Image: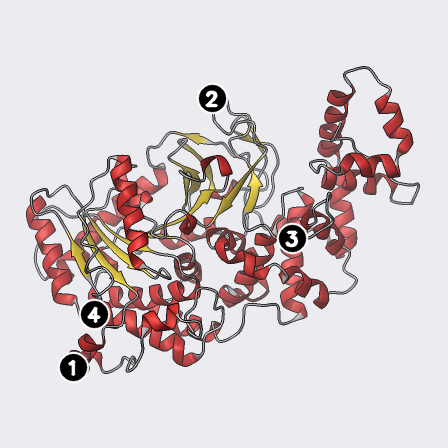
Amino acid sequence: MKHFWKVGAALSMVLFFCMINVWVNADTRGAYQRAKDSAAGVYQKAKNTATGAYQTAKENIVYAKERASSAVSSGIQWMTGAVEPTAIRINPYKDTVATVRVGNELNTNERAYLEKRRPKVKAGFEKMLNRSLDGKYVPTMAIVGSGGGYRAMLGCLGSFSAAEKLGIMDATTYITALSGATWALAPWMSTGMSFGNFKKYIHKTVEKDIHVSSVGEAKNIIDMLSVKLMFDEPITIVDIYGGLLANRLLNHFGSDCQRVYLSQQVERIKNADVPFPIYTAIDAREAVSREPHWYEYTPYEIGTPSFGVYVPSWAYGRQFNNGQSTNFAPEQSLGFLMGTWGSAFGVHFGRAWDEVVEKLPGNLIKSYVERKLVDPLTGKRINTTWAEIFNFMYGMPGQELAARPTIKFVDAGIDFNLPYPPVSGERPERKADIMIFLDFSGGSLISSMKKTEAYARRKGLKFPKVDYDVLETKAMSIFRDPTDPSVPVVIYFPRISDAQLWQENRSNADFKEYKIEGFDFDKCTNTLSGACGTTSFKYSERNAEKLMDQMEFNIMVHKDQIMEVINWVIDQKS
């Protein structure tokens, strides 16, 4: 009898609070006891009904939730003083029903992107290699960015900058990212800045700690959460954590930083002038912890090839039934998605909500958020490290997750730290011929690549043999199969400072701009006093500059080897 709803005492807002209490507590195991304590009469009446009382109670809750919308909306307006939350007012899809797409063929919009991108990639290769590719095979090249917190974010920016200078970026079709790499890719895509300007922007941003520092920042997070409350969406500590990330990494948008959305990146890629971004997360269910399902997030849609189901990005987080959305909730914020993609670090911000509370005393929305964050059985704060959303596969016949009301997602790096699956060939239209791996993993670098190779072997995907003896000792390694051109080439850049390589090239005029003298990337990452630790969310100007410069140098100094292997791929496959 765990789903009874309770009736509040006779106050001026009786109906409103009744609906809110049903709305907030319907799915908690403690609702029964609270209902008994505060509405004994209602409970007793339900208890004395026929054996179908339990089902009747469930139906009453659904009925109440469906009809509580106007009461909840009025209540939130009363608490915030707003006529209508901005996120709802500006939602371009507020009258559009979303439909789940079934099938692993590429989205038609992604196919249209590829048609536009192919001639631009060809031109990019021709300029970079100084040769004509008329009548030649034009390879698909992908950049694969690892996790590693701010370290990975800064390392990716240095790498992207080098890729732009060498012409690699213009010849790249896909960039896949997880965790910290998404914090480089997503804000860059959303701001529309050049790499040069974006580096300067992030350079200044990371000098300020991620925690709430003002009433304005706290209010940004409160406003974002109020919209989720209106639609009875799940809230975990990852929502708060994502709000912190948005306050920092999306501060370019000022007070609108919590209203930046993934679907808006369609505008950035519509002319196919930049690579196609793919962000990743994994299913957090314990039942699949040994073989988690990878989910792909693109500006067009979100889903997984494991089930062949995809939902428009702007509808992710809505309630669905049998493949159709049943409400018109706004899109999940990009901050929330960045928190989801990098949720392995969310545990470090378990007290982030307290910062918001301290900055906004007396705000009534806080009490409703607090109830979402507290375990009703223990009364303790739930510091879960997963994000939770309504399940867009709910009620779909034949789907493994059809009976689950919500899905939980975590950082894909918990499986392995290189987002290889989206361009692995599981979806053949995306199979990359050349993969440039940017690995900023902490600890042993061998582990991430071994798990990546194991994934490929397990799935029957072609992958070159990796020499693990050199993986952690060289600033760049190339792995290929000279006997089989269908095996992708892997160009691997780890977080390594090669002191000898720097000494041999430091006098070269091309590298005089890099300030990496004495910098040890491994020491900065893996020692207790290292400033590049995975949980470091504040960097000095000097450390941020050294880290970005190190990765830019590592790629620039290997220009000839990179061009040689790209030419080799073209000639082998032509």
What residue appears at the point 20 percent right and 40 percent down from the top-left corner? 462
- Left or right: residue 542 versus residue 275 is right
Between residue 222 and residue 50, name the one nearer to us.
50
State the separation of the CA atoms marked 2 and 1: 62 Å
Q: Position of residue 18 (x, y in %)?
A: 82, 39
Q: Amino acid at mark 2?
A: Gly
Between residue 59 and residue 458, name the one nearer to us.
458
Element type where label 1 sits in the image:
loop
- N-terminal of the pair, mark 3 or mark 1, is 3
The residue identified by callout 4 is 556
- N-terminal of the pair, mark 3 or mark 4, is 3
Circles 3 and 4 in contact, beta carbons < 8 Å: no
Q: Amino acid at mark 1?
A: Asn
Element type where label 3 sits in the image:
helix
State the separation of the CA atoms marked 3 and 1: 53 Å
State the separation of the CA atoms marked 2 and 4: 51 Å
- N-terminal of the pair, mark 2 or mark 1, is 2
The residue identified by callout 1 is 508
| Residue reaching furthest to the right | 10
Quadrant where the N terminus is found in the figure: top right
The residue identified by callout 3 is 225
User: In the drawing, what numbered circle is on residue 398?
Assistant: 2
- Mark 1 surroundings: few (<14), some (14-19) or many (≥20) residues within 10 A: few
Quadrant where the C terminus is found in the figure: top left
- N-terminal of the pair, mark 4 or mark 1, is 1
Depicted 171 relative to depicted 317: above or below: below
Circles 3 and 1 in contact, beta carbons < 8 Å: no
Q: Position of residue 430 (x, y in %)?
A: 27, 42
Q: Visible in this render: residue 331? A: no
